[in-house]
Image (tube, rainbow, N blue to C red):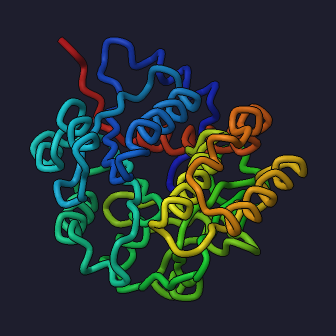
């Protein structure tokens, strides 16, 4: 379906060895995540690329100037990132674009919308492939085909079983189903995606469209889930949402991530919720056994996620113009 044979991680290691004396795959990461998640997002993608194909990909960091930043986030951006305009002058082989915290109901009124659409148009003809993650996927399909996201109400957060839809070679030896983290407030209607020519890879009964493809000149891969997440990422997001409630910056107490905590941890968080609703103090979290709960978390999506990115990197490796280094 993708016009290339899928290669497993072992075969990708062989590709990595064969590229000695030639340049690595240059993978750009346009990181739009909020300040508190900037560094963790870099580590998540770096870890996943390394697990998929050790030494094959060099991760280069870029930012959209229109994404609002606080002083700490901007300091990190200044120290470690280049503006997206630098990407246009020195293209990469492939690109990963993350989502951002939604600010506006209408994506086209987000402060970075013009910059995002310029990036989408550029990526169509200047990358071998681009992965659009979460809100970036929503922005891309809106710009490309006018498919609008729709609000979910409460945040969709947790681990969900995603089932394969048909045959495809992006994931070598693709499992019929696997567990994928999701964390979002909106979704894309499956029927509209199919009507606009997108190919569904995986879907979930609870989270609906999980991953899908569309070929421009570049192969665009869209992920509504977060296979790059570390085991504790959903925990940290949930704690941030609880902290926001306790501080008074959000009105409602957040729902617990689904299918994520074991029974003991879930009971502890339910007890914390009851206490917080009756005694809204920031100090409640400092008394909570966060470290013990994080130590009990697992990452069942790690191996299939590595296979997904191994298949993607193999596609990029097979389609890149390899340049021999002097």
Q: Quadrant of the N terminus?
A: bottom right
Residue 185 at x, y = what percent?
A: 53, 73
* Left or right position of 312 against 60: right
Residue 121 at x, y = what percent?
A: 22, 66
Q: Residue at x 73, y 62 (%)?
A: 273
Check the image and report above or below for 174 versus 222.
Answer: above
* Left or right position of 277 against 239: right
Q: Residue at x 52, y 30 (%)?
A: 47
Q: Out of 38 and 236, give the one closest to the viewer.
A: 236
Residue 12 at x, y = what percent?
A: 55, 28
Q: Out of 103 and 322, give the one closest to the viewer.
A: 103
Check the image and report above or below for 254 versus 259.
Answer: below
Q: Out of 309 and 6, give the one closest to the viewer.
A: 309
Q: Quadrant of the C terminus?
A: top left
Q: Residue at x 71, y 43 (%)?
A: 288
Q: Residue at x 74, y 56 (%)?
A: 272
* Left or right position of 297 against 239: right
Check the image and report above or below for 93 versus 245.
Answer: above
Check the image and report above or below for 29 versus 189.
Answer: above
Q: Is residue 246 visible?
A: yes
Q: Residue furthest right?
A: 263
Indicate the quadrant where residue 207 lies.
bottom right
Q: Is residue 1 visible?
A: no
* Left or right position of 25 against 269: left
The count of marks equals 0
Residue 311 at x, y = what percent?
A: 56, 43
């Amino acid at each position: 379906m993708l016009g290339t044979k899928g290669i497993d991680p072992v075969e990708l290691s062989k590709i990595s060895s064969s590229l000695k004396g030639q340049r690595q795959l240059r993978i750009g990461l346009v990181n739009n995540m909020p300040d508190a998640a900037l560094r963790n997002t870099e580590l998540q993608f770096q870890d996943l690329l390394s697990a998929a194909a050790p030494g094959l990909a060099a991760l280069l960091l870029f930012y959209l100037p229109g994404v609002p930043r606080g002083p700490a986030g901007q300091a990190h951006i200044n120290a470690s990132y280049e503006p997206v305009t630098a990407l246009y002058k020195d293209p990469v082989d492939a690109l990963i674009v993350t989502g951002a915290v939604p600010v506006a109901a209408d994506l086209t009124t987000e402060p970075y919308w013009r910059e995002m659409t310029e990036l989408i148009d550029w990526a169509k003809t200047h990358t071998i492939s681009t992965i659009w993650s979460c809100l970036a996927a929503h922005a891309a399909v809106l710009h490309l085909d006018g498919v609008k996201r729709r609000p979910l109400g409460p945040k969709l957060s947790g681990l969900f079983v995603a089932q394969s839809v048909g045959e495809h070679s992006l994931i070598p030896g693709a499992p019929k189903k696997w567990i994928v983290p999701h964390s979002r407030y909106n979704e894309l209607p499956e029927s509209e995606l199919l009507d606009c020519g997108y190919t569904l890879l995986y879907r979930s009964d609870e989270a609906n469209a999980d991953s899908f493809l569309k070929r421009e000149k570049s192969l665009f891969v869209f992920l509504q889930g977060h296979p790059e997440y570390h085991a504790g990422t959903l925990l940290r997001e949930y704690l941030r949402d609880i902290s926001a409630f306790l501080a008074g910056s959000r009105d409602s107490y957040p729902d617990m991530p689904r299918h994520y905590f074991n029974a003991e941890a879930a009971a502890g968080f339910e007890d914390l919720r009851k206490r917080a609703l009756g005694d809204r103090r920031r100090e409640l979290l400092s008394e909570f056994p966060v470290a013990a709960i994080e130590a009990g978390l697992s990452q069942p999506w790690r191996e299939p996620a590595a296979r997904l990115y191994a298949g993607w990197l193999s596609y990029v490796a097979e389609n890149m113009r390899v340049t021999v280094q002097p």
